[in-house]
Image (spheres, helix red, strand yellow):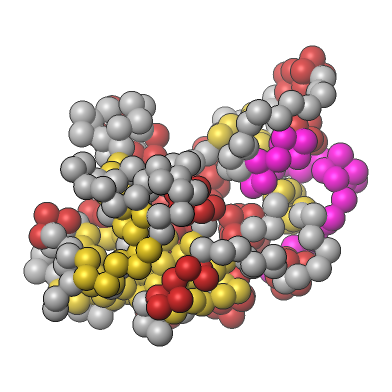
Amino acid sequence: MNGVRAVTVAPGVADSLRLDDDWPEPAAEEGAILVQAVAVGVCGTDQEIIAGEYGEAPPGQERLVLGHESLGRVLEDPSGTLQPGDLVAGIVRHPDPVPCPNCAVGEWDMCRNGRYTEHGIKGLPGFARDRWRVQPRFAVRLDPALAPVGMLLEPTSVVAKAWDHIERIGSRAVWQPQSVLVTGAGPIGLLAALLGIQRGLSVHVLDRNTTGPKPELVRALGATYHTSTVAELDFAPDVVVECTGAPVVVMDAMTKAGTNGIVCLTGVSSGGRTIDFDAGALNRELVLENNVVFGSVNANRRHWELAAEALARADQAWLSSLITRRVPVASYADAYTSGGTDIKVVLDFEQ
Ligand SMILES: [Zn+2]
């Protein structure tokens, strides 16, 4: 083994994306478990890093290895936690060094001081390289059947946290939710819908697209697809999982939720756009209906494990159809250019 291929950027420098052919082997300090990469998923955060808007190289380094939606196979694990050949994903976020009270108990998704680090995003090398290492506490084993789709674990961990917190908030009183509205049928929205279906709820997914794979993917799940506005829907959902970040959709979602409704915001708005909206009417709705609106980001180990269980229970063909393109590493740049009807694009290290 003499160097690995790695997809890297110089954070803060737009269009500095390149494939390094001779990147150093993962350092021993990265963790005891040595992993051969299978694939990484690509998402909007990668695009922002490539555009130079986001991202931070590890201390003392100029370039950052991309990739936070990981999947690999264990080559060696002297700690005995995993076996060679096991399918594994690496948890993205590591606790801050202080640590804050949340990070101190493993709730790094709720970090208070913002000094956490994240693989492929903030201060830690990513997983878009032939081999990487991970500490046992940040390694999540996947069911062997998930080999073609296991890179969906990271986005699934995000929705597993969202659902976990929705249920924790719901337990404030007797709560028997029936209907869920998911706004946005991207990977996060579709996976949020999957977890809603797995809970036996009546799931509605709203998206602008009338063509492409989204309508059929939603129907195949047993959910209902809507292309109207949120305001036009003829029901008041018990739960809303907002995945667009589009200001009008967010505002409509907050007022559409039913009595005792819970609205979980997962989409990040770009800001700077103002819309007309009646703040007094929103306040009135929230108070008089006991509604809760909350934000949710990232996930801790418990959520990653819940996500691994959810994926193992899901229809594997349906999960596979979320992956609309599998790009070989040699054509890496193609993985980062968005196709019109793509849902999830993955960079394939085995092709
Ligand atoms: Zn913290």
Is 282 above or below relative to 108? Answer: above
Near-viewer residue (168 or 96): 96
The spot of residue 94 in percent (x, y) is: 28, 44
Count of marks, rendered view: 0
Specify the quadrant that holds the N terminus. bottom left
Residue at 76% in and 39% down: 249
Is 183 above or below relative to 23? Answer: above
Q: Quadrant of residue 140?
A: bottom left
Residue at 42% in and 51% down: 303
Near-viewer residue (5 or 173): 5
Q: Is residue 189 left or right of residue 61?
A: right
Residue at 61% in and 43% down: 267
Specify the quadrant that holds the C terminus. bottom left
Q: Is residue 350 left or right of residue 233?
A: left
View extreme (top): residue: 280
Q: Is residue 336 left or right of residue 340?
A: left
The spot of residue 206 in percent (x, y) is: 77, 53
Residue 270 lies in magenta, yes or no?
no
- The main secondary structure of the magenta stretch is loop
Q: Is residue 143 left or right of residue 98?
A: right
Is 96 above or below relative to 286? Answer: below
The spot of residue 10 in percent (x, y) is: 34, 50
Residue at 79% in and 60% down: 209
The spot of residue 229 in percent (x, y) is: 85, 45
Q: Is residue 319 visible in this depiction of the protein?
A: no
Residue 229 lies in magenta, yes or no?
yes
Near-viewer residue (32 or 314): 32
Q: Is residue 272 visible in this depiction of the protein?
A: yes
Which stretch is magenta?
221-250
Is 319 above or below relative to 138? Answer: below
Q: Quadrant of residue 343?
A: bottom right
